[in-house]
Image (cartoon, coloured by chain):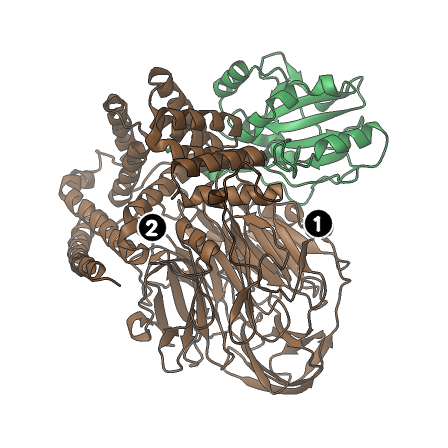
Chain colours: A green, B brown
Amino acid sequence: MMVKNMGEKQEIGNPLPAFSLPMLDGSGQRNPESFLENKRGALIVFWSGVCSHCLRYDQYFNEFTTRYPDLGFSSIASRLNETRAEMTSSVRDRHLTFPILLDEGGKVARLWYSQQTPRCYLLGPQRELLYRGAIDNFRMPIDPEYRAWLDPAIESFLKGEPIARPETASFGCAIETAYYKLPGQL
Amino acid sequence: MSLLEDLIKFPVRLMQTGFAMAGTALHSAQTAIETVLDVRPANVTAAPFDGPPDLDHALSDLANRAARIVYFMPHDAEALPDAFRNLFAAARSSFRFADLTDIRNLTLPLRLPFALGTLLTDAGQRALEGMDAIGSPRYLEFIAYAFQIFSEFPVYVTLEYRALIERQQQWLKEHPEDAATRKDLGRALSKVGRFAEAVEHLNRAAADDLTLRSSALHEAGVALFFSGQYAEAADSESKALAANNENARARYWLWLAAQKLGGYPAAIPAAHHMEMKTGHAKATVVYEDIAERVGLDKTSGGRSIVVFDYNNDGLLDVAIACAHGGTSLYRNNGNGTFSDVSVESGLYHGVNGFGMAAGDYNNSGYPSLCIVRMGFFGGMIELWRNNGDGTFTDVSVESGISAWAPSFTCSWVDYDCDGKLDLFVCTNVGGVFDRKVQHKLYRNNGDGTFTDVAQQGGIIAPFGAIGHSWGDYDNDGYPDLFISNALGRPILFHNNGDGSFTDVTAQAGLDVPALAFNAQWCDIDNDGWLDVIQYTWSVHEDTIHSMRTGETPRFGHPTRVFRNNRDGTFSVISPELGLTECWGSMSGNAADINNDGYLDIVLGNGGPLMDRNEPMVILENDGTRFRNVTFSAGLPIMGKGHGINCADLFGDGRLIILCSTGGAYPGDLLTTSVFSPNRRPGNYLAVLLTGTKSNRGAVGARLKLVAGGREQHRVINGGSNFGCLPPQQHFGLGALEHVESLEVWWPSGAREHFTDLPVNTRVRITEGEGIWTTDPALTSPA
């Protein structure tokens, strides 16, 4: 039975709940503070190795801390029934270098009200929520109609300016759905 | 109609009759045997996590799996061993229910021929019905399309596409010359948004096999378009046309790319150009997209849109079902903006919604929501009770409506006029070989529970349906049911008023096949008798034909308006109304969007495949004919239109058009669009009814307004068109500044008459009070 978490959605500006999750690579437990240490903030992304949307951002995530050295970064793998072996093969085949936390059972996804991958949470130094939503409008950067959503939010934050659009839609694959519990269809 | 077509139709009719008779006999024999053995098929009330529960479902599941295996396998003898292995695994999965220690299962061999026979006769009847709707020349192509949709959806919704792609990649490593599989791989990559890789494979397939060249280059053009490389897309589509000048889709996508580029690139030959002949009639209203500005932009992959007042504060709120996430609920703040309260409300947990309808089934003043799912596959039917404090609770199980069924639409209706809203769920088939899950009519027991009385009442339908609508076409006081079958003739069930229904389709003259999605009862000619609009879905080549010519293609099915002849029969009047264009209408809505007193039509168009993007279409009605004003109204090409809703969200007399867009595949996502007129196009009056003896939301009530000596008629609809229209009724009045009278015919049978009503405001009327009260605009314009 899915644990339902109702009526407590975190508002922009308020701290997000704490968690402690194991790293996929076996290097121990991490909490949000692990990524905030000596940083001005951090980006946490709900991620899945199967999700084709996440795949689009492999390079973006790999290069995130290089691009934004003042920010920490981690992903959280919460998708129902995604195995450790599947994730490990994604890391190997796609040369992923960013941290991946294992959220078996999707508890943190529910705690943070995340239903789709990739969904981004930009945190301030006190774990306060600064931005929540998508990376962009799901167009390709070459598209004249492309609009970045996350980068402008980060840049405003780093400049100490208010974030004009702190919440956007989420595009992506469902983290938890009845369809993942059905017998394989292929 | 040619002699050849008549000659084809004759044996088809014979075969239909034969299949029907054989099916009836086999069903009877199967039922008798199963009754004796006490092994009747189960009602699937929960998701089938452990696989099919009985023989009937297992056979369907196996047949669908076998179809998928054939669909996805490379066309090569070397692929056969793998295919057989997969088939064996599929059989084990489908029949995992069979407990051989249960003595009743020893009778499986006896029951198997009957179960198989009914499966084949059901599928055969559907196949032949489809031929009538599609036309024989394109039938095989359509069958292939149906296999594609039904084979791919289960794989994509479960995110098994990665395994599929890896399987195709592995095959191509060993068989790099297999251009057909390479093209399939390219299309699969495009569907998941891996456009660059898709283009690479599609171009190679086009180079390797000249028979695939045009289609592969077209698909490459589509992938380039989705990745925003419009010049490259135009070039690829032009090459596709050079390879096959009859490739209509390539010509259309070349036109789409040219729109993005501000015109055809100079290098594109004039012979490849296309003129858009429709959509340019002069619009009375011009629109702008305000979704982001008003805060209705947080949903991607939206489906149904419900406009209702969930917190009973007098303002219209919006709920949007989301195919890949939880249901969105937006609270109207009363200042021209909305707040996303999905989480606080609990509706956030209603994941993967498709169809949705709002209804105050417990007469609490707070409308609840029914959610249905995945009409091409399957999903849970859910009821979310509005607690009246801003939250909703899933009461599916305790209310007795919990079931697993493929469904696109649902609606609330007081079919027995007892003052309590009942619930109708319209079901489709979830696979090519699925058994038809019967539609569900849940009678409201008055204690928070429901009982399915559909079959007991005679609502039995052999074919899958996407849309439906309830309306009292014969003015006898009881709402009747029009079912828009996905493929074939619609069905009209007359409500006999005693809990039973009679199929009167043939005698009503509605026995006309089409491929259709939704339907809507409304009084299009304002004569006091409800007409019905059937929003048809045309194959892509037909819509392109209409775009290029403004006319109906051969075998085409434009949007159909069946005029009520006031004697129990209907006539198709689409051509007289100027409705001659074919569109892939997945949803539609009739509303007076330009406040001139005549119902206009808004169509949400497209199709599931990546290369099926179409404009959302506005058809303005001047009282005699409809004119396509899409492009002059400033609407961009949209993509795939699902929920279409028209509502005066800000209480200022402007009907806002809401449209959920985006497709079924991961590579085809968009957010909801919200189009606002740039001005109020005329005077108006909004009317909000509250039932007392009737159901509180007054669903089913009829209204007749007289202004300037002219009648306008409305009916309060409890949902169906991929959503649910707002409870208040909107009357456009043009320049008129006075309403002579308003008559309300309540579902209870009571009638009330009011005179001298104001304009440019909302009036509230409570059943039995005999007065109206003004309820001036409550919000500021956005």
| Vertical placement of residue B235 versus A7, above or below | above
Which quadrant of the view contains residue B469? bottom left
Split into 4 quadrants, where in the image is the C terminus of chain A?
A: top left
Q: Which residue is mark 1?
A: B295
Give the residue type that dot 1 points to.
Gly
Q: Nearer the viewer, residue B708 or B781?
A: B708
Residue type pointed to by label 2: Asn
Q: Secondary structure at mark 2?
A: loop
Q: Is residue B366 above or below residue A152?
A: below
Instruction: Please rate how many residues cluster around mark 2, counting C-alpha atoms within 10 Å: few if below 14, some from 14 to 19, many from 20.
Output: few
Secondary element at tag 1? loop
Q: Is residue B465 left or right of residue B700?
A: left
Tell whether A37 sits left or right of B34. right
Q: Earlier in the sequence, mark 2 or mark 1?
A: 2
Is B648 or B25 nearer to us in this picture? B648
Q: Taking the image as drawn, is residue A21 in sight?
A: no
> Left or right: where does residue A68 sit relative to residue B258?
right
Q: Which residue is farthest right? A: A160
Quickly name the residue at label 2: B43
Residue at the image point whose x is 65% and y is 39% from the top: A145
User: What residue is shown at x 35% (from left), y 20% (from top)?
Assistant: B171
Q: CA distance from mark 2 to mark 1?
A: 42 Å
